[in-house]
Image: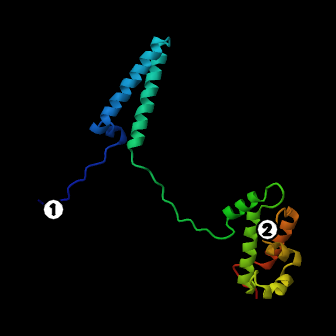
Amino acid sequence: MSGLPTPRPRPLRPVLRLLQPPLRRLLVLVLIAAAVIGGIVWYFGLAVPGAVLVAVAVAAVGSTWIAVQEADAVEWPTKPAHRSPGARRDVETLSWSMKTRGGVHEKTLARAREAARHRLLFLYGLDLYDPANRDEIERLLAPGVVRVLLTPRHSNLDLVSFTRLLGALEALGAPTERPS
């Protein structure tokens, strides 16, 4: 050979791909079914233009269905999801879980408890569940807030108490920077 690259065959357009042998049989069956359906609706009293329109619509839907089933799947590039605590989805989930009958849901309180534990440990080096740190934690948070956080199952916690708890957690500071 002369060293020239051989041209690659161009991919067929989706419409022309329907005319190739594997799909040609399905396309013919769809067209026959469309003609039969058009004939049936004409026989039962639909005018000729209406029957033709029904047949064309059936043929269009059928051929589109075949083309879509045989086409390559289109995938959009996706960025990897980076989930950080307190992200928008977390706040949305937290707010929806607060709307229950009989007080704040236990799952919501558990998430607030974990946020408090994380902030106390990261910012102040205090463990929420360590009895030796209890006095220091009560100095940072109100004793009522600490009592709510340490109660394993606190049913029927009202929204006002929970708002007080969230305010106390917010006053601790953001867990991204240590206090000076």
Which quadrant is home to the C terminus? bottom right
Q: Residues within 10 Å of mark 2 (few under 14, many from 20)?
A: few
In the structure shown, which secondary structural element does the residue marked by tag 2 occupy? loop
Q: What residue does disc 2 label?
A: 153
Image mark for residue 3: 1
Colouring scheme applied when the structure was drawn? rainbow
Q: Can you tell which quarter of the image residue 132 is in?
A: bottom right
Is there any visible trace of residue 176 in the rendered image?
yes
In the structure shown, which secondary structural element does the residue marked by tag 1 occupy? loop
Amino acid type, label 1? Gly
Instruction: Report the label total.
Output: 2
Tell me which residue sits at (70%, 60%) in the image: 93
Tell me which residue sits at (15%, 62%) in the image: 3
Left or right: residue 4 compared with residue 130: left
Please, is residue 42 above or below residue 59 in the view? above
Which quadrant is home to the N terminus? bottom left
Whole-percent x and y of residue 22? 29, 38
> Toward the viewer: 87 or 152?
152
Amino acid type, label 2? Arg
Tell me which residue sits at (35%, 32%) in the image: 27
Q: Can you tell which quarter of the image residue 109 is in?
A: bottom right
Please, is residue 180 above or below residue 103 in the view? below
